[in-house]
Image: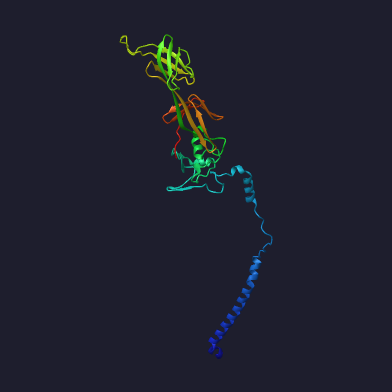
Amino acid sequence: MSFFKNNAHWLLLSTTAALSVAGSFFLFQDITEFPDALEKLYPKQVASKKPDPIRLDSLERATKLVALSGQWKAEHDNLLFVSEPYLLESDGPKRPKEGSLHRHSKTGAAIPNAWFLQFGLKLRQPNITQEDSDGDGFTNEEEWLAGTDPIDASKHPLLVSKLTFVRAAEIHNHISFLQYLGEKLTVRRDDAPKRPQHDVKVGDVIPDTDIKLASFEKRRKDDSGIKDALDGSLVTLIDGKTANKQIAEIKGKPADFVDKTFFLELKYPKEQREITAKPGGQITLNAQETYTIIDSTPNGVQIKDKDGKLIEVGRTKTE
């Protein structure tokens, strides 16, 4: 007993060590058995080798929408999935339909961008206004000004817009009133060779002319009653072709009938020709355009269309 008393601390230490070894053994055994126990509680799910089914509902919905093509459109003229074009200007981007990139070369008027886009013309091409997109002889800016279709050659501005006044030729036919003897009056053609004289009566046509003696008025230049006052009798003459009326004073101012001839030119890429006409005459530019010549003006010649509208044809401008 004295041994145990004297060595009690060693005995306690040995017992504790043995218990620690035994506890470690049982703990290790439990740890090795834990996975099997856990698998029994929560069995592993065996992954299937068969793939999940493909969901086709989105594709079927898109297929139905494609079939309804009328619903596939954007709010602009470009492709559905492409943004409409913009023009970069100093104050920021702008839609092409807004504003005007081009102006008429002669009038300076702004040509709307929308007009070019309406007919599919190249808005951003610098010289698009001067091009003839349909080959009818008129530029795009001329078609815009006239309100015609720039991509349809059968619809173009009036040809009269391509008509210019070149010059006018005048031939004077002066008729002098020389005397009267009873019913007969003596007249003279001052511009004819040898200045022939003719005795005519009221109602007669002067020989070799279309000029008719329409009336005779006997009078004096004053009403003083003086016997030898100068004679102021008058004759009225009318040109049978032009209906131009002139008055000749006895031994005084002659009647002056002017025979005018106008020279015009129709010129554009499709045609070039000279046209000669007289006042009262007609000119035909095509099957739809016929005009009547009125008379000369300070800037050219005045003509009239079939509806009575007066048009002034200007002189040829030198480049």
Task: Give whichever of 167, 205 is nearer the camera.
Answer: 205
The image shows residue 37, relative to residue 76, as above or below, that is below
In the picture as drawn, the residue positioned furthest to the bottom comes out as: 2
Task: Give whichever of 283, 38 is nearer the camera.
Answer: 283
The image shows residue 82, relative to residue 171, as above or below, that is below
Q: Position of residue 265 (x, y in %)?
A: 50, 33
- Whether residue 242 sits left or right of residue 42 in the image: it is left
Quarter of the picture holding the C terminus: top left
Q: Position of residue 5 (x, y in %)?
A: 54, 88
Res 33 visible: yes
Residue visible at 51% across and 36% down in the picture: 267
Q: Position of residue 304 (x, y in %)?
A: 48, 26
The image shows residue 206, relative to residue 34, as above or below, that is above
- Specify the color scheme: rainbow
How many numbered marks, from 0 up? Answer: 0
Residue visible at 57% across and 85% down in the picture: 14
The image shows residue 152, relative to residue 44, as above or below, that is above
In the picture as drawn, the residue positioned furthest to the front comes out as: 194
Residue visible at 62% across and 48% down in the picture: 62
Task: Give whichever of 70, 30 is nearer the camera.
Answer: 70
In the picture as drawn, the residue positioned furthest to the right comes out as: 50
Res 310 visible: no
Quarter of the picture holding the N terminus: bottom right
Q: Position of residue 220 (x, y in %)?
A: 35, 12
